[in-house]
């Protein structure tokens, strides 16, 4: 079964440390945890304390190497992005990595819907298996189809195409988001 630690390491590499770009709709973020989405996380009082103690420019390298902040972020992602989507029950590590990373970047419901759409798009008009419900929840039905999927390399490509198409939609609807294209598309793997 898929390993959270493997997936988390990949996603953390994409997310990086502390950022607060005014054009980023996620707002203030550290290790991929946004203050907007997780205002009650213990991360934020510690971030605020470090910024107050050292000033922002000196606090950033301290925050980026703070083991406690990293541990809180990892715990938050395990509970709210990995466990919620039952990714420990996925047999293919690459697919679990992709669904997890997409969930962190676009939301767990979006990641689940991409998986479900991908499964339906690769079932050869229901010859291989019946369509799964595109409900944004990875449950027993979705997992059963996924874990017996006959062509996970194709499914992986479809998931990445859906992710890339979503980035284009975001950039077309808000041109300020184009500045994130290089970073976003570093997450899209087709091979």
Image (cartoon, rainbow, N blue to C red):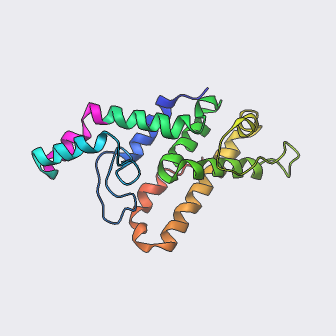
- Residue 121: x and y, percent? 76, 53
Residue 66 lies in magenta, yes or no?
A: yes
Q: Residue at x 11, y 45 (%)?
A: 54
Q: Main secondary structure of the magenta part?
A: helix
**x and y percentages locating residue 27 in the rendered image:** 34, 58
Picture quarter containing residue 47? top left
Q: Classify residue 112 as left or right of residue 14.
A: right
The residue under the point 56% across, 43% down is 98
Q: Which residues are magenta?
A: 57-69
Query: Residue extending furthest right?
Result: 127
**Which residue is drawn at the image coordinates 48% and 47% (left, top)?**
104
Residue projecting furthest to the left? 54
Task: From the viewer's perspective, tell me whether residue 123 is left or right of residue 71.
Answer: right
Residue 66 figure quarter? top left
14 displayed left or right of 17: right
The reply to whether the magenta stretch includes residue 188 is no
Q: Quadrant of the N terminus?
A: top right
State the residue lying farthest toward the front.
40
Could you tell me residue 3's position as x and y percent? 53, 28
Taking depth in this image into account, of 185 and 112 the one nearest to the observer is 112
| Observer-nearest of 159 and 53 | 53
Question: Residue at horizontal 70%, vertical 46%?
Answer: 154
């Amino acid at each position: 079964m898929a390993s959270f630690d493997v997936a988390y390491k990949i996603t953390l590499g994409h997310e990086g440390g502390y950022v607060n770009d005014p054009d980023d709709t996620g707002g203030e973020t550290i290790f991929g945890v946004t203050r907007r989405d997780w205002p009650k996380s213990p991360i934020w009082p510690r971030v605020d304390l470090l910024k107050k103690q050292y000033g922002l420019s000196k606090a950033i390298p301290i925050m980026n190497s703070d083991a406690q902040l990293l541990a809180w972020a990892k715990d938050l992602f395990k509970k709210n992005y990995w466990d919620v989507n039952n990714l420990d029950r996925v047999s293919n590590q690459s697919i679990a990595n992709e669904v997890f990373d997409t969930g962190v970047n676009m939301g767990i419901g979006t990641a689940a819907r991409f998986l479900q759409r991908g499964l339906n798009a690769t079932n050869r008009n229901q010859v291989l298996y019946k369509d799964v419900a595109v409900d944004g929840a990875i449950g027993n039905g979705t997992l059963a189809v996924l874990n017996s999927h006959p062509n996970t390399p194709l499914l992986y490509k479809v998931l990445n195409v859906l992710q890339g198409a979503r980035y284009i939609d975001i950039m077309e609807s808000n041109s300020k988001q184009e500045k994130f294209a290089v970073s976003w598309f570093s997450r899209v793997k087709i091979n």
